[in-house]
Amino acid sequence: MTTKPYVIDQLISAKAIAARVEALAREISDYYRGTDKLVVVGLLRGSFVFIADLVRELDLPVEVDFIEVSSYGNSTESSREVRIMKDLRGEIEGRDVLLVEDIVDTGYTLKHVLEILGTRHPRRIEVCALLDKPSRREVDVKARWIGFEIPDTFVVGYGIDYAQRNRNLPHIGAVRFT
């Protein structure tokens, strides 16, 4: 696949991300205090860097699992068709679950995943998203914890890619096509 030429403008620094992840972990730890073991579910692939940093900051016993879905392919626009590529390995029935998402955009992916996980009867399920684009929301879905609210721009870095590129950037950058 050929991608259009682009440049990346830093939007959120690595230092700001680290500070926000630490603050989110404190809030989440307080919220789930007393839980036997929190099941932290990462939405792959974009959340993998965020979830790794987040779980290391949580002051709770955790179990980590992953679900991989796709709604973008190699595009910058959501297809609104959500496909499960990899399902959870463990059971979540009766468990406290934290779903970790890289970015909430239209909301279709998150809504679909919450519906799937809801059929498995977790005790409770909450969402933590690194990034939120409320101006793009098309379905009513919210994350309890948001790292940063961002404008309607395509972003990469800190695990988030464009056509499988730029996941390794330590910051969040806005893609500007040239």
Image: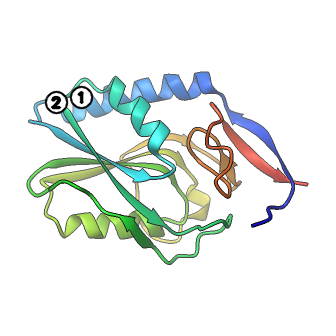
Residue 160's disc number: none
Q: Where is residue 13 in the image (x, y as percent from the top left)?
A: 65, 28
Dot 1 falls on a residue whose secondary structure is helix
In the rendered image, which quarter contains the N terminus? bottom right
Residue type marked 2 = Arg
Residue under pointer 1: 30
Tell me what residue is drawn at x 29 percent, y 34 percent: 28
User: In the figure, 44 relative to 80: above or below?
Assistant: above
The foreground one among 154 and 68 is: 68
Farthest residue in the front direction? 1
Residue 40 screen position, x and y as percent: 28, 43
Q: In this view, does 17 lie above or below 124?
A: above
- According to the picture, the residue beneath numbered tag 2 turns out to be 33
SS class, disc 2: loop
What amino acid is found at the position of numbered circle 1 in the picture?
Asp
Image coordinates for residue 3, horizontal then vertical, percent: 79, 61
Q: How crowded is mark 2: few (under 14 residues within 10 Å), some or many (20 or more)?
A: some
Classed neighbour count for the residue bearing mark 1: other residues with Cα under 10 Å, few (<14), some (14–19), many (≥20): few
Residue 79, position as x, y percentages in the image: 58, 75
Q: In this view, does 177 lie to the left or right of 120?
A: right
Q: Distance between the residues labelled 2 and 1?
A: 5 Å
**Viewer-proximal residue, 89 or 43?**
89
Q: Nearer the viewer, residue 78 or 170?
A: 170
Q: Which quadrant of the figure contains the C terminus?
A: bottom right
Vertical arrangement, residue 126 with respect to residue 112, above or below: above
Residue at image coords 47%, 46%: 47
Q: Residue at x 17, y 52 (%)?
A: 124
Its colouring scheme is: rainbow
Circles 2 and 1 in contact, beta carbons < 8 Å = yes
Which residue is at a point 41% across and 34% down the rendered structure image?
52
Q: How many marks?
A: 2
